[in-house]
Structures are given as C-alpha cells and as structure tokens.
Amino acid sequence: MVEDLSRPGEPPSPVPEQLEVRLRVALRESRLELDATRAQLHTCQQDLERAQRQLVDLEELIRDLPQIFERKFHQRLQPLLDQQQLLAQDNHALREQARRLLPPPPPPPP
C-alpha cells in the first residue's frame, strides 16, 4: 500500500487504486531503467579496463620502439657489411694477383 501523502492535521484520504497502480508501474519502469543503466555502466567499465590495458601495452611498445628500430637497422645493415667485407677481400686478392702478374717496374734512371 502507498503511504498517505495528506497534509498534517487533515484526515487521511484514501489513495485511489488507480494512482497506486500507476505508481507501481512507474516504480517497475524505474527499476528496469536502473537495471539497464547498471548493465550499461558495467559494459562501459569493462570497455574502460580493456582500453587502459591496451594503453599500457601501447606505452610499452613506444618505450621499446628505439630498440626495435635499432635491431631492425642492424639486421638490414649486417648483410651489406658482410658483402662489403667480401668485396674488400676480393679487391685485395685481385690487387695481389695483378701485382704478381705484372712485370716489375723499371728501376729509376740514375
């Protein structure tokens, strides 16, 4: 039963049954809205937690980026350095071979 809302000093008036039904319906709707709002809040909190975890992961990645780029740079540079070293060795071997095959230079004039 709904509380009597009459003014003090006045005799209590009976609450019409129709008003009580409307109040109960309004209360039920309010509870449903509250439940829906709680569900939305829970979903939003889960989304926020997921976004915060992703933010932490991205911040870690940003901190690691310089080392990642440096490692990638060296991975790409190493084959070029190896090739340069082989070319230098080949160059040295060819120069030695050419020096041995060419006749000695003539002695300087007296």
Image: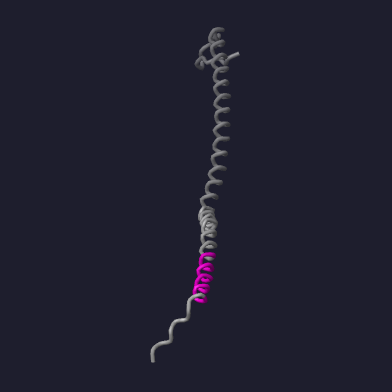
Compared to residue 9, the image places residue 40 above or below, namely below
Which sits in the foreground, 27 or 103?
103
Residue 105 % position (x, y): 44, 82
Residue at image position (55%, 35%) is: 47
Which sits in the foreground, 71 or 38?
71
Residue 68 % position (x, y): 54, 54
Which sits in the foreground, 54 or 66?
66
Compared to residue 52, the image places residue 98 above or below, namely below
Determine whether, in the image, residue 29 is placed left or right of residue 108.
right
Residue 42 appears in which quarter of the rendering?
Answer: top right
Query: What span is colored magenta in the figure?
Result: 86-100
Q: Report if residue 89 lies within the magenta region.
A: yes
Q: State which quarter of the image contains the N terminus.
A: top right
Residue 108 % position (x, y): 40, 87
Residue at image position (54%, 49%) is: 61
Residue at image position (56%, 10%) is: 21
Please name the predominant secondary structure of the magenta segment in the image: helix
Compared to residue 8, the image places residue 104 above or below, namely below
Which sits in the foreground, 31 or 37?
37
Residue at image position (54%, 20%) is: 30
Compared to residue 35, the image places residue 72 above or below, namely below
